[in-house]
Amino acid sequence: MSPASVRPSARVSAWCFLLGAGWFAAAWIAAAVAAADFLESFYQPHVLAFTHCMTLGWISTTMIGGLYQFLPSLAKQPVSWSGIPGVQVALFTAGVVGLVGYLWAGHTAGAAVSATVVFG
């Protein structure tokens, strides 16, 4: 199989990198808004939202984009179903948006449901 036939579309990776940049910016805006909470306990809703915004939003989304670009070339075979990367990124992003939003608001039940979407 030629390298060109296993090269994935850069569209999903580009979206992941753009989403990651957006999460990075959103996390630092949230940190500026909730700066006083960082001086108190770690288990404040805003601090937890910031932490998950950075780890799941920025770092994980960027890693997913890199993996969708790199792994098909490494394995020398394309992704089995070409629609799955977009669906996976959309579900992951929806779950992270819900998780961060519910953590920011302090609603643990909603955060648990959103975490199920992220990790489910």
Image (cartoon, rainbow, N blue to C red):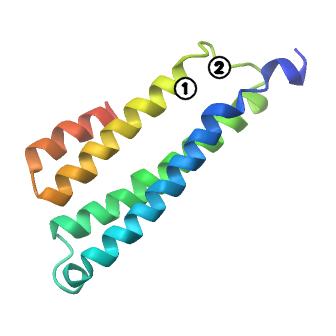
In the image, 101: left or right of 16? left
The residue identified by callout 1 is 85
- Quarter of the image for the C terminus: give it: top left
Mark whose residue sits in front, 2 or 1: 1
* Left or right of 76 in this view: 61: left
Give the mark count.
2
Residue at 19 percent across and 56 percent down: it is 103
Label 2, secondary structure: give it.
loop
User: In this rendering, would 94 be left or right of 105?
Assistant: right
Q: Where residue 64 appears, x then y in whole percent?
A: 55, 41
Position of residue 113 measured from the top left corner of the image (x, y, whole percent): 18, 36
Residue 99: x and y, percent? 25, 47
**Residue visible at 61% across and 33% down in the picture:** 12
**Mark 2 touches mark 1? (CB < 8 Å):** yes
Of the numbered discs 2 and 1, the one sitting upstream in the chain is 2
Rendered residue at 17%/42% (across/down): 112
- Residue bearing the label numbered 2: 79
Q: Secondary structure at mark 1?
A: helix
